[in-house]
Image (cartoon, rainbow, N blue to C red):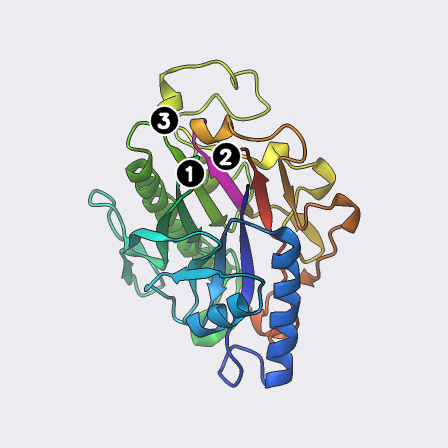
Amino acid sequence: MLLGTWNLENLYRPGGEFGPRDKAAYEAKLSALAETVRALRPSLLGVQEVGDPAALADLAGMLDGHWRTAVSEHADSRGIRVGFLSRLDLEVLADVEAFPAKLRPVQGDDAGTPVATTGRGLFAVRIVTRALTVDAAVCHLKSKLLTYPGGRFQPRDEGERARVGAYALYRRTAEAATLRALADRLLGGAGLDRDVVVLGDLNDEVAAATTQILLGPPGSELGTPGHGRPDKGDATRLWNVAPLIPAERRFSRVNFGRRELIDHVLMSHRLTGRVTADGEAGTGLPDAAAGLDLPSVGADPQARRDAPGSDHAPVWIRFQP
């Protein structure tokens, strides 16, 4: 069984402000996305940057067999949101945007505008097979790409760059704490007995403070001496599968020529025990021989609006039901 996460990069039907300019570009994008999903063959795929739920339905219609889709009702200012593609029936568990009760709003701009919600909804579903039940949450945290007043992608000065960078970090941190609260709800303090996965575009790397917030009690990460030593924290921990990805493929995006892993899959203790011994995690397609060829992206998200496929690679984990 394979589950994963993939940022589909501006999945809109054609003709709008952000999506492909014409039908031909849209069909080329869908075709490239569908080819990857067919090769990946996921049971459940968390997706980001769904600008139009109908476009996700169009993608599902190009796949073999009967696929289900579900999307969050909470979109950002461009209309993008998270969701799921699944070969199994989906039960929606949660669609969250409000920060937890004890987390105060953060500063959003120079005017001091308070922000008390995630930019995009945090969406959770349940899938059930004869062998197991998996609760999955998908997210798309605040981007490190900075947008300045008036839609500018360049600051007027370094002071503005620093301030806007701080506002983005405040929000991404608060969103990570909100996502951790949702994970706590799914885990219910019983991660030893529940199959729970948290996945999505965290917009930062493994060691980032925002990513680390999601793990819970420290000291037991995969690849460390603490892993495999049972303790009370195992019931509430999440494990990032990144160390299981071959080092040469441990990236999901290329930003200004730099490889970075910003898309992640995190699992409960019970689910880590189901991971298969061979080919357990990866980026791109499971066939390692296929390579991982991603475009390098810059500061302007509109530069690739007519490009096929996505500027992100899928990140996935294979496990035994």
Residue positioned 65% across, 37% down in the render: 245
Residue 255 in view in this figure: yes
Could you classify mark 3 by the number of other residues whose Cα lies within 10 Å: few (under 14), some (14-19), or many (20 or more)?
Answer: some
Residue 156 in view in this figure: no
Q: Earlier in the sequence, mark 1 or mark 2?
A: 1
Residue positioned 74% across, 56% down in the render: 293
The stretch of residues the image draws in magenta is 264-269
Q: Earlier in the sequence, mark 3 or mark 2?
A: 3
Q: Report the amino acid beneath label 2.
A: Pro
Report the side of 311 relative to 115 (left or right): right
Residue positioned 60% across, 71% down in the render: 30
Q: CA distance from mark 3 to mark 2?
A: 14 Å
* Image x and y of residue 121, in percent: 35, 57
Residue 130, label in figure:
1
User: Mark 3 — residue?
Assistant: 193
Q: CA distance from mark 3 to mark 1?
A: 16 Å
Identify the element where label 2 is drawn.
Answer: loop
Residue positioned 49% across, 73% down in the render: 55
